[in-house]
Amino acid sequence: MRITRVLSTALLLAGLAAGPAVADSSPSASPSDDSSAPTQAGTSFRTATELDQGQTGTASGSTGDYLYWSFAADAGQRPTVKATVKLPDTHAGQTWQLDVYDGLRRRQACQYGAATRTAAQDATSLDLACTLRTVRAWSETWANDPLPGTYYVRLTVADLQSSDLGQPVSTEVRVDSKDIGGSAAVDGSLAQPLTPGIAAKSASDEDSSSSTSAALSSIEPDGGWSSGWWSDRWVWTGVGGVLAALAGIGGYALTRGSGRPRRVPPPGM
């Protein structure tokens, strides 16, 4: 009966601890109002257009242009950048490329996804995707790990015929993330997120003529930046310690027996 109670308590604790793990696998970026999504893209890192996670940014340009967006990614997130290029009616084969850079403008490798694709002559659109590695709260200075802060998306054509240069195209870019949780947590955190970027801000004067000026980027995740020390790994560590203690008690109850064996003579005989 005692062993049954021990096992029932262990199963109950394991079931309660499974809740955070399920929540961690859900997308962290909630869909936002598309009316506030940007309708243009920057032409350099300094003028990259800010894009919130969950938004779909659109922009029109010409083949040969460099289109830039920026978004914020926090520790524990695994961002996925998707881009769609709507090609002109008549064109030759074209190769488009999607690159993602961190706040230090280091190009980040895609964990999976087709970041470079070639469109056939009869293709009307082209889809690109890049899923980054999980953003870490801290890393060695020599490593190229993704860290919390601003990330830059660059979309451009990498190979085309000279006759297609300058043709109009329209693009769509969207960024979503999954919260990986404590499985990607590390011991340490940055003093400040890597947000040295400068974003494009539109301003209107008295004549209602819009202009673009450079300003320090204020983009950040919903709810602000995480502190970097808390994760559900603490919960699993505590639950693991409780289960280990219960297992020790159960093992002791199984092996201690009922006392001295009957056939062993008492001491002194």
Image (tube, rainbow, N blue to C red):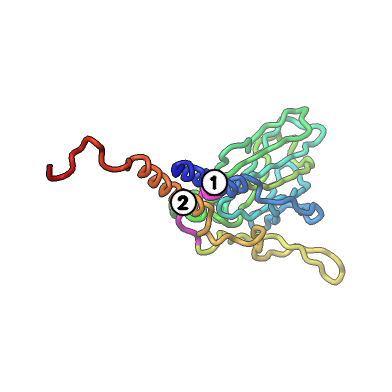
Q: Residue at x 67, y 58 (%)?
A: 222
Q: Position of residue 15 (x, y in %)?
A: 56, 45
Amino acid type, label 1: Leu
Among all residues in the image, which is located at the extreme right?
207
| Residue on which disc 2 sits | 237
Residue 100 visible somewhere in the drawing: no
Q: Residue at x 82, y 54 (%)?
A: 35
Q: Which residues are magenta?
A: 181-190
Q: Nearer the viewer, residue 193 or 17?
A: 17
| Residue on which disc 1 sits | 12
> Element type at marker 1?
helix
Answer left or right for 113 relative to 119: left
Answer left or right for 113 relative to 145: right
Residue 183 drawn in magenta? yes
Q: Position of residue 250 (x, y in %)?
A: 40, 44
Q: Residue at x 12, y 42 (%)?
A: 269
